[in-house]
Amino acid sequence: MNRLFIYFFINVFITCLPVSGEGQIKWVTWEEAMEKSKTDKKKIVVDIYTDWCGWCKKMDKTTFSDERIVKYINKHYYAIKLDAEFKNEILFNGQSYQYTKYGNRGYHELATMLLNGKMSFPSMVFLDEKFTLIQAIPGYQDEINFLMITTYFGRNAHKNTPWQKYSADFKVEDFDINVAKKK
């Protein structure tokens, strides 16, 4: 009887363990995104954050763990996290970006460039398949807003549909993560 209980317990425990990578956004480095883009073109979404930002942490716990968002991002984007106070060099589009000390803290030049100098955290930056800026969106985004935003750019709706129309027509209950990109 004890042996049966132990086998049962082990089986239940193992089945409940999460499979690595499932249910999480697959964050990559700049280098990985650029390398992967050579053979598999996708848009890029960059989460610009800081360690001290409370709203950034909330977005990690809520928005970035929403199953619909995780599946959509992993299928249609390369996702990059960029600490706006990252202290190492990043090479991007043939240019070197560094950390710059400013007062007691500092900032990373790439974050400043992507945000056009408007340092607000969190901020989401969307780049096309050629790493060209589509749009930077400042501030915390809840799950529904972020789902609308990622599909707006992911489906290329931004090229021919005004945001007001897209967001008014968007129905989260109709959202299907298995539908191929439109247009």
Image (spheres, rainbow, N blue to C red):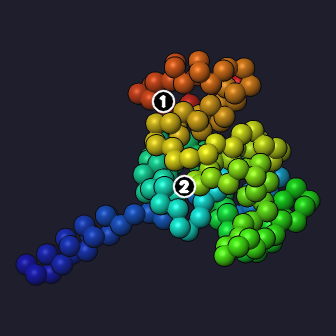
Residue 77 visible to the viewer: no
- Residue at 54 percent of width and 33 percent of height: 148
Of residues 37 and 89, the one drawn nearer to the viewer in this rendering: 89
**Which image quarter: residue 15?**
bottom left
Estimate the spatial distance between the alpha carbons at disc 2 and disc 1, rounded to whole Å. 18 Å
| Callout 1 amino acid | Phe
In front of the other: 153 or 124:
124
Chain-order first, disc 2 or disc 1: 2
Left or right: residue 27 versus residue 37 is left
Mark 1 closeness class: few <14, some 14–19, many ≥20 residues within 10 Å: few
CB under 8 Å between discs 2 and 1 = no
What kind of residue is marked 2?
A: Ile
Instruction: From this view, report whether residue 55 is shown above or below residue 71.
Output: below
Rendering coords of residue 149 (x, y %): 58, 36
Q: Is residue 113 placed above or below 135 in the rendered structure?
A: below
Measured from the top left, where is residue 84 in percent x and y? 67, 63
Whether residue 83 is visible here, answered yes or no, is: yes
In the image, what residue occupies the spot 47% across and 60% down?
54
Which label was assigned to residue 25? Answer: 2
The answer to whether 105 appears left or right of 12 in the picture is right
